[in-house]
Image (cartoon, grey):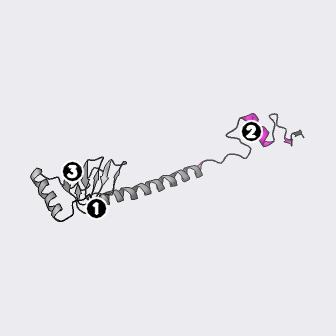
Amino acid sequence: MVFDPGYVPKLNGIAEQKAVIDELLSLWKFDESNFCVTCMIRTPLRSKHCRRCQRCIAKHDHHCPWVNNCVGVNNHRHFALYLVNLVFGILFFDWLLYYYFSELPKPDAHDCLILADSICSISNGRRRDGYETVAGDEV
C-alpha cells in the first residue's frame, strides 16, 4: 500500500514561511496544533507530523508498520479494506485448518502417539507380551 497518505504540501521558500508565521501570529494561532515546526508549514485540522516519514500528513491516523506507510486522508479507505480482507483471510485459514483436522483419520483408543511404546503400554494397562494388567498385577 504505497498510496499517498495525504501529505501536506511544503512551502516554496523562506518568504512564504515568514508570511505564514506572521499570519498565524496576528491571529494568535501560532501553536503546535496550527503550525509544524519541523516542516515549517501551516497544518490543517487533524494533521500531524510523522517522525518516520518526516512529513506532515492530513488527517493522520497512524504510521502502519505492516504496510510501511502512514494512514491518512487519501488512503484511509484502502487501509480499512486491507483490514477487512485480512480478517476474512484469517477466518478462511481457520476454517481450512478445522476442515483439514476433521478429515484426518482418528487414532485408535489404545494407540499412543506421543509417548514411547513402553511408557504407553504401561499407561494403557497392557504389557508388550499381550497380557493385560490391572493395578500392576498380572491377570
- Tell me, yes or no, whether the highlighted magenta stretch contains residue 78: no
Residue under label 2:
120
- Tell me, yes or no, whether the highlighted magenta stretch contains residue 124: yes
Residue at the image point whose x is 9% and y is 53% from the top: 15
Q: Give the mark nearer the N terminus: 2 vs 3.
A: 3
- For disc 3, the neighbor class at 10 Å (few under 14, some 14 to 19, many from 20) is some
Measured along the vertical axis of the image, is residue 60 above or below residue 104? below
Q: CA distance from mark 1 to mark 2?
A: 65 Å
Q: Give the magenta part as a residue range.
A: 104-133
Asked if residue 16 lies left or right of residue 47, the reply is: left
Q: CA distance from mark 2 to mark 3?
A: 70 Å
Asked if residue 6 lies left or right of residue 139, the reply is: left
Looking at the image, do the residues carrying marks 1 and 2 touch, with CB atoms under 8 Å apart?
A: no
Residue under label 1:
46
Point out which mark residue 39 bears: 3
Please name the predominant secondary structure of the magenta segment in the image.
Answer: loop
The amino acid type of the residue labelled 1 equals Arg
Asked if residue 83 lies left or right of residue 6, the reply is: right
- For disc 2, the neighbor class at 10 Å (few under 14, some 14 to 19, many from 20) is some
The amino acid type of the residue labelled 2 equals Cys
Measured along the vertical axis of the image, is residue 93 above or below residue 120? below
Percent across and percent down for residue 126 are 81, 39
